[in-house]
C-alpha cells in the first residue's frame, strides 16, 4: 500500500464532516463505564487533536507514535481504512457490532505495524445474512443501549496491544511501521484509523462471540 493512495481518498472528502462537540462515553443501560478516551503520543508528549465532527485529526511527524487509553479493560483494537467512504461509514456511529472472526491474525514481531488489511465494512451483498441468527440478541442490545449498534465487518487488530513478556493485553501500542515493509520515516499524508474499545461481548446462537464496541475515529496527518 502506498500512502499517497490513501491520501487521495481522504483529503478531498474530509471536509464533508461537520463540526460537533465531543460526547462522553456513556450509554443507557450501563451504570459504570471505564474511561476509554484514546490519546495519541509522540516523543513522550500527548498530541492535541483538531475536532471535526466525530473525527479527531492529529498532526504527526513521520516517526514512531503511541495510541493509549487509561485502562487495559478497554480491550483496544485498531483498524485502518484505505477508502474514506468506508471510514466515514464506521466513524459516524459511536457503537458498532461485529463478529470476533473479523479480528486479524498477528504476531509479536509485527505489533508495531499500523496497516494490515482494509475491506468494505458494510454487511451487504453476500454478507447480508451474516447476523440473521442474532436478531433477538440485537433487539436486546438496541433496548439496552438506547440506540442500535451499527452491524459491520470490523477488520481490526488486537496484536498491537499485546505485552512484551507475558502476552497479556496492554493499554497502549507503539507504532513504528506503516506496513510490514514500510517504516514511518518519510511517510506523508492522511491515514484514516478507527480505534475500537470494548463495550460488551455477547454470544450468538452458535456460541460465537459478538463484540459491541465504541468507535474512536481519527485521521493521522503525517507532515
Image (cartoon, helix red, strand yellow):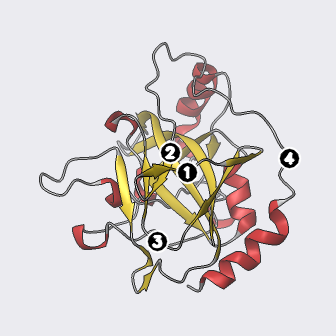
- Whether residues under marks 1 and 4 lie with C-beta atoms below 8 angstroms apart, the answer is no
For image coordinates 55% across by 65% down, the residue present is: 80
Q: What residue is shown with label 4? A: 18
* Label 4 vs label 3, nearer the camera: 3
Could you give the CA–CA distance between mark 1 and mark 2, rounded to whole angstroms?
8 Å
Q: What residue is shown with label 1? A: 47
Q: How many marks?
A: 4
How far across and how far down the image is residue 116, in percent?
A: 45, 73
Q: Secondary structure at mark 1?
A: loop
How far across and how far down the image is residue 135, in percent?
A: 59, 36
Q: Secondary structure at mark 2?
A: strand
* Label 1 vs label 2, nearer the camera: 1
167, above or below 178, in the image: above
Position of residue 204 in the picture relative to residue 47 (left or right): left
Could you give the CA–CA distance between mark 4 and mark 3, rounded to whole angstroms?
29 Å
Position of residue 24 in the picture relative to residue 10 (left or right): left
Sooner in the amino-acid sequence: mark 2 or mark 3: 2
Sooner in the amino-acid sequence: mark 1 or mark 4: 4
Q: What is the crowding at mark 3: few (fewer than 14 residues within 10 Å), some, or many (at least 20)?
A: some
- Whether residues under marks 1 and 2 lie with C-beta atoms below 8 angstroms apart, the answer is yes
For image coordinates 40% across by 37% down, the residue present is: 74
Q: Image quarter for residue 22?
A: top right
Q: Quadrant of the N terminus?
A: bottom right
Q: What residue is shown with label 2? A: 39
Residue 188, disc:
none
Sooner in the amino-acid sequence: mark 4 or mark 2: 4
Amino acid at each position: 500500500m502506498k500512502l499517497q493512495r490513501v491520501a487521495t481518498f481522504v483529503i478531498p472528502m474530509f471536509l464533508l464532516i461537520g463540526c460537533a462537540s465531543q460526547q462522553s462515553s456513556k450509554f443507557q443501560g450501563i451504570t459504570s463505564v471505564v474511561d476509554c478516551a484514546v490519546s495519541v503520543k509522540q516523543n513522550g508528549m500527548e498530541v492535541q487533536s483538531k475536532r471535526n465532527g466525530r473525527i479527531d485529526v492529529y498532526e504527526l511527524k513521520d516517526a514512531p507514535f503511541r495510541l493509549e487509553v487509561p485502562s487495559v479493560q478497554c480491550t483496544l483494537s485498531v483498524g485502518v481504512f484505505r477508502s474514506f467512504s468506508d471510514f466515514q461509514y464506521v466513524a459516524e456511529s459511536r457503537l458498532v457490532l461485529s463478529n470476533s472472526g473479523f479480528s486479524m491474525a498477528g504476531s509479536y514481531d509485527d505489533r508495531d505495524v499500523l496497516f494490515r488489511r482494509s475491506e468494505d465494512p458494510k454487511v451487504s451483498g453476500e454478507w447480508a445474512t451474516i447476523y440473521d441468527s442474532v436478531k433477538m440478541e440485537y433487539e436486546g442490545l438496541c433496548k439496552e443501549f438506547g440506540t442500535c449498534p451499527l452491524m459491520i465487518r470490523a477488520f481490526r487488530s488486537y496484536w498491537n496491544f499485546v505485552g512484551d513478556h507475558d502476552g497479556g493485553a496492554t493499554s497502549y501500542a507503539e507504532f513504528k511501521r506503516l506496513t510490514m515493509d514500510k517504516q514511518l520515516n518519510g511517510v506523508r499524508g492522511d491515514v484514516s484509523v478507527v480505534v475500537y474499545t470494548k463495550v460488551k461481548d455477547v454470544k450468538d446462537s452458535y456460541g460465537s462471540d459478538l463484540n459491541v464496541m465504541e468507535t474512536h475515529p481519527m485521521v493521522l496527518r503525517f507532515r
